[in-house]
Amino acid sequence: MTSAGNVQIHYALCSGEVVRSVEVYIPNDLADLRDDVVLWKIVSSEGSTKEIFTVGKTPRGFDSATQFKKALPLDKELHFEVDSSDQNYAGWTFRFDDLETQRIEGYRDGEDFEDVRDFRRAALAFC
C-alpha cells in the first residue's frame, strides 16, 4: 500500500511477457468463479509491459472491464489476479486491514519486501 493509502499490485514480467488483465474481487466460492464479486478489472487487448497497477486506476493501454466504484471493503477477504500472455497467473488473497504501508506482500508465503528491486529479483528467479 502506498503512503497515500492506495493499494498497488506489483507483477514482474519475464522476457517477452505482457500483462493481459488485472482484477480484484471478493471470492465467494472457489469452485465456481462465476459467484465472485469483481470490484475492479482492467484488460489490455494488446498486452502491456506495465508492472505496477494502482487499484481503481486504468493505465494507458488498458480498458476498464469493471469500473472501481468505492473503497475496498475492510471486513472482507479479497483476491487479486494478474494474467499474462504466457498464460502465467499471479494471485494473492488478502485483507485490506493486513496491508502495510510501503511494503510488497504476498509474493510467497511469509515473504514481503520493502524494496521493489528485491521483489523483482525474487520473482524473476522463476522465469
Image (spheres, rainbow, N blue to C red):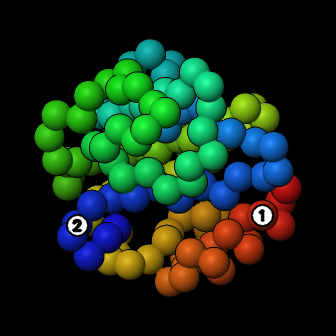
The residue pinned by badge 1 equals: 124
From the image, which quarter does the C terminus lie in? bottom right
Provide residue 64's location: percent of width, then percent of height.
35, 26
Neighbor class of circle 1 (other Cα within 10 Å; few <14, some 14-19, many 20+) is some
Name which residue lies at 62% across and 25% down.
46
Residue 25 placement, left or right of 11: left
Count of numbered circles in the view = 2
Residue drawn at point x = 41 percent, y = 25 percent = 63
Depth order, front residue of 70/33: 70
The residue under label 2 is 5
Give residue 35's mark. Answer: none
Residue at the image point whose x is 75% and y is 42% from the top: 17
Q: Residue furthest bottom?
A: 114
Between 48 and 71, the residue placed more toward the observer is 48
Residue 67 x/y as whole percent: 26, 28
| Residue at the image position 63 percent from the left and 73 percent from the top | 119
The answer to whether any part of residue 39 appears in the image is yes
The answer to whether residue 83 of the structure is visible from this angle is no
Left or right of 116 in this view: 27: left
Against 48, is 64 above or below? above
- Marks 1 and 2 close (CB-CB < 8 Å): no
User: Residue 38 lies in what quarter of the image?
Assistant: top left
**Left or right, 64 with reference to 115:** left
Q: From what the image shows, is residue 20 above or below residue 57?
A: above
Name the foreground residue: 70 vs 95: 70
In the image, residue 52 lies at what x, y percent? 49, 56
Quarter of the figure with the N terminus: bottom left
Query: Dot 2 lies on which element?
Result: loop
What is the CA distance from the residue labelled 1 to the residue labelled 2? 27 Å
Q: Is residue 38 above or below residue 121?
A: above
Q: Mark 1: which amino acid?
A: Leu
- Looking at the rendered structure, the kind of residue marked 2 is Gly
